[in-house]
């Protein structure tokens, strides 16, 4: 399995607000004072954090359509095969929370061949969280495993698209919901097992 190439400029492709904070801090470092730059950068980062968290808060009415739309996201009536592990990220995945991804990396060698990251309840993500997901995807790919993302809400989905996260997992492995993700996992497993079982012609010695 080929490991997808990383973005050539990992600091870019993130949200415009993240880039603005970085740029302002950098310019203050160059044209003002390092101490001022650090203080301003911390204040701006804190304000950005508050803005991202509050932007994910919504109040909506529960309707029949809402219930029906949510059926594809629930796990209660879904079968998870033995070759799949499903992990969920719950809440904002921002700086300070990314170390919790170790729940997956510490079990790396014991995991099945396909990993689904369920992002249905991940309300927000920033550049630090996105980098953590990219590094996780690359580590899993390095061990021959397939990573599938599903159910990302509006803000995370937008940032994931802007950052060209498809390069790390493949566009076909970013699904709208857990139902699609499980179907994709079955397809991947069937394809890889059929390929492994197929006899391959050995190269003759030159």
Image: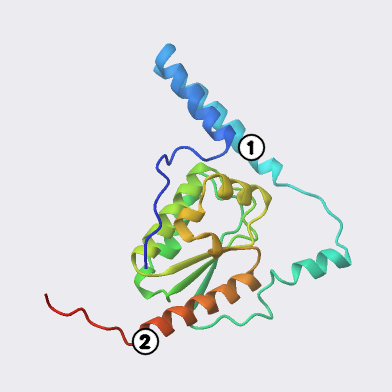
- Label of residue 50 in the image: 1
Write down the residue under mark 2: 198
Closer to the camera: disc 1 or disc 2? 2
Q: CA distance from mark 1 to mark 2?
A: 54 Å
SS class, disc 2: loop
SS class, disc 1: helix
What colouring does the structure picture have? rainbow
Direction front: furthest residue: 206
In the picture, the quarter occupied by the N terminus is bottom left
Q: Nearer the viewer, residue 162 or 85?
A: 162
- Point out residue 105 in the picture as x, y percentages from the top left corner: 39, 63
Direction left: furthest residue: 206
- Point out residue 114 in the picture as x, y percentages from the top left corner: 47, 73
Q: Residue at x 44, y 23 (%)?
A: 26
Image quadrant in which you'd find residue 38: top left
**Residue 138 visible in the snapshot:** yes
């Amino acid at each position: 399995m080929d490991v997808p190439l990383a973005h050539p400029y990992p600091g870019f492709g993130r949200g415009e607000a993240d880039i603005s904070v970085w740029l302002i801090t950098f310019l203050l470092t160059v044209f003002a004072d390092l101490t001022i730059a650090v203080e301003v950068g911390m204040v701006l980062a804190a304000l950005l954090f508050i803005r991202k968290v509050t932007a994910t808060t919504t109040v909506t009415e529960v309707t029949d359509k809402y219930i029906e739309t949510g059926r594809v996201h629930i796990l209660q009536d879904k079968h998870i095969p033995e070759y799949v592990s499903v992990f969920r990220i719950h809440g904002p995945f921002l700086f300070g929370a990314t170390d919790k991804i170790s729940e997956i990396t510490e079990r790396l060698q014991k995991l099945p061949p396909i990993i689904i990251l369920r992002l249905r309840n991940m309300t927000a993500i920033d550049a630090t969280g996105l980098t953590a997901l990219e590094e996780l995807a690359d580590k899993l790919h390095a061990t021959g495993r397939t990573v599938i993302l599903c159910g990302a809400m509006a803000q995370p989905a937008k940032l994931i698209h802007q950052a060209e996260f498809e390069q790390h997992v493949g566009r076909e492995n970013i699904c709208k919901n857990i139902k699609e993700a499980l179907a994709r996992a079955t397809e991947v497993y069937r394809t890889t097992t059929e390929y492994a079982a197929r006899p391959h012609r050995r190269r003759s010695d030159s």
